[in-house]
Amino acid sequence: MGQWSASCDKITKGWSSYKKEYTELQKKLSDSYLSQANNLIDNWSIQIKDATLEASNKYEDALSMKRWERNLEILQAQLSLMKIRLSKNH
């Protein structure tokens, strides 16, 4: 049995007809939700920083402040990268 081109597949062909809607949703995600995400993460981190520090000092198996801050930076960098990638698509 031979392999068909993806363009011959009815489902793939149907999905490709939604390119405009997909691009619009990518733009909406990039312009509003990702910008809001950074603000929410900033507010959230301010709210729990003291509790994270206290737990780190009190419990041996708690997440260290250094590790918590590093992972927070990684999350924000990933969001920024996602926003950049989405902006290149439209």
Image (spheres, helix red, strand yellow):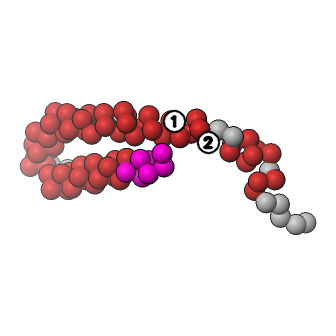
| Residue of label 1 | 24
| Residue closest to the eye, 9 or 1 | 9
Give, as a single range, the part of the protein colored magenta.
84-90
Which residue is at 20% across, 38% downward? 42
Rendering coords of residue 46 (x, y %): 14, 36
Residue 51 colored in magenta in the image = no
Residue at 36% from the left image edge and 33% from the top image edge: 32
Task: Please name the amino acid that badge 1 sits on.
Answer: Glu
Separation of marks 2 and 1 at Cα, in angstroms: 9 Å
Mark 2 vs 1, N-terminal side: 2
Confirm whether residue 12 shows in the render.
Answer: yes
Q: Which mark is residue 49?
A: none
Q: Nearer the viewer, residue 57 or 88?
A: 88
Q: Secondary structure at mark 2?
A: helix
Horizontal side of residue 22 vs 46, given as left or right: right
Name the residue at 83% across, 60% down. 4
Q: Does residue 27 appear left or right of residue 49 in this picture? A: right
Image position, residue 22 (x, y; %): 56, 39
- Measured as percent of width and height from the top left, residue 88 is found at 44, 51
Image side of residue 74 versus residue 85, left or right: left
Query: What's the magenta bit mostly, secondary-structure-wise?
Result: helix
Which residue is pictured at 75% across the width and 56% down the height?
Answer: 6
From this viewpoint, is residue 51 visible?
Answer: no
Secondary structure of residue under mark 1: helix
Q: Which residue is mark 2?
A: 19
Residue found farthest to the right: 1
Q: Is residue 46 above or below residue 79?
A: above
For residue 15, which quarter of the picture?
top right
